[in-house]
Amino acid sequence: STSASLAAAANKNIQSRNWYLSALEWINFKDDFIVSTKEVVDEDRQ
Amino acid sequence: MSLLPGINEATEPLELVNDSNEVHSLAIPIGSQWKVDLPSDFKLAITIKSGIAEVLGTELANDTEYHFQNWKFTVFAVEDVELSWKCTQSLQPKIESNNTASQIYNLHFALEKVRNSSFYGPKVLIIGERNSGKTSLCRILSSYTIKFKSYQPLLINLDPNESIFSPPGCLTATPISDLLDPQSPSWGQSMTSGATALHSKQPYVENFGMEKISSNKQRYMSNIEQLASAVNKRITSDALVQRSGCIIDSPSLDQYDDNLDDLEQIIQRLNVNMVVIICDDDGLYQKVNNRVKPIIGDLMIRLPKLSGVIETDDVYKRSLQRSAIREYFYGNIQTVLSPFTAGVDYNELTIWAPRDLTYDTSAGKDEALELLPVTLEASTLQHAIIAITYADKNANKEEVSKASIMGFGLITEVNEKRQKMRILLPVPGRFPHNAAILTSSRYLE
Ligand SMILES: Nc1ncnc2c1ncn2[C@@H]1O[C@H](COP(=O)(O)OP(=O)(O)OP(=O)(O)O)[C@@H](O)[C@H]1O
Ligand SMILES: [Mg+2]
């Protein structure tokens, strides 16, 4: 679905500095997708 | 917003707060607070040794050093607290009891009850007098909401003078899905800072672009309408946000029209179902109550000026706005960011400006929302912050004014001879092929 692909696209961008989301992207975004650097580092350690 | 000198202050390492600074210890008894009225050039480090201490609702971890500068905040002891601190200059901590903390807890538990018993969380609007603690209350309530349960309340900022996950001049809506940064006056990092140590937040941003909402009430209300439309759609498509509800910060009551029509519009657009008013003036309270009660019924709650409030002035508020701009491009002492400078030809740029009706008195009511084309010249653009929209560079002004905001640029140099500009951007690459809107913020590097 569009909302899933929008969310996936937004998610891919989180790892780097990025622009704010457009209204449509933001409406369909789920904050559960956000990964912090710390979590990424923790995962790498395991 | 006046010219804002100095850019390196916040990103310089805290060299002065090092091991050679004298370490002091301090005990804060349960229910009391240390109001840290930190002068702008002081740097302070605090480590909690034992007990639970909160900065605006966010608990500080024990044995971790927190750094603060250019911020006035309050350390509240939920339990007896022992801490150590060091500061670059001499500081005299004063401890006093906090007599509004229990009212904030009661309010929080009332909101919690709604969340626990319904799929539709509370939508609470915080209004009140100037400098009464509105923004602080929003921050405390947001922190408490996520403290014990994995809720995601939507923090909505309707005050363009506050910088919440954005530079000043914006209205924003941000799901609070994880800890707020207790060290940051602008609440923490947004996605324009990329992956950070603390989880970054994803705000939706509307650009008002001026300091006073009275400069163009029609534009302000149109910003709110667009924000409300995005918010209402997000709530419908996101069950967790819907259940967690909204916490809405707002400009002080003296900025609304005398008949409070704009307050009523805000309540209706955002489907507000609870209003908290922080107000010591009985007359003002009665006036607002008479207007608000018929709309939302008994769910209007009155609080006195919060006991943690530190008296501040415009100079301090400007310095917070300056830090927020600096933080947007350069990060803060915890997360240092590198912005990018793009060289842009005049013909690659389209810049519009909102009407400021304080000066532009000839504009009729229906022209208030119209954007005006900006002539590219150094006198208007040097050091200006521009909002970069999602509308194409060649889009018409109606499209541009409806478009969402992708971010901000800082015009660092205007070369009229070569018809070129240098623009600082948070994201690498060329200047986007998009239309921009001039804001009233200026920032001198
Ligand atoms: N625990 C606290 N509760 C209330 N205010 C606090 C607390 N800690 C610090 N403060 C300080 O008190 C000052 C005023 O608070 P705040 O900004 O929340 O008021 P406001 O009503 O939002 O003001 P404005 O009308 O300018 O928007 C701020 O400098 C804030 O940092
Ligand atoms: Mg405020």
Image (cartoon, coloured by chain):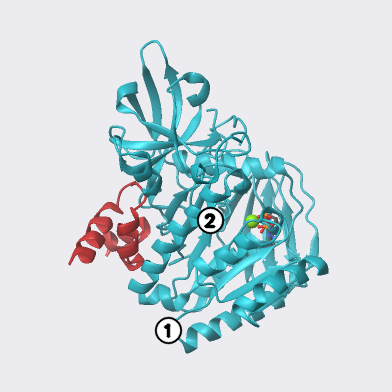
Residue B56 can be seen in this image: no
B21 vs B12, nearest the viewer: B12
B70 vs B390, nearest the viewer: B390
| Residue type (three-letter) at the residue carrying disc 2 | Trp
Q: Position of residue B278 (x, y in %)?
A: 71, 67
Q: Residue at x 53, y 69 (%)?
A: B268
Q: Which residue is mark 1?
A: B119
Q: Position of residue A7 (x, y in %)?
A: 26, 62
Which chain wears red? A
Which quadrant, please, contains the N terminus of chain B?
top right
Q: Position of residue B306 (x, y in %)?
A: 73, 66
Mark 1 falls on what kind of element?
A: loop
- What color was chain B assigned in the picture? cyan
Q: Which residue is mark 2?
A: B187
Pointer 1 or 2: first along the chain = 1
**How many numbered discs sit on the rendered protein?**
2
Q: Kindly check if marks 1 and 2 are in contact, taking CB atoms under 8 A apart as contact.
A: no
* Label 2 chain ID: B
Q: CA distance from mark 1 to mark 2?
A: 27 Å
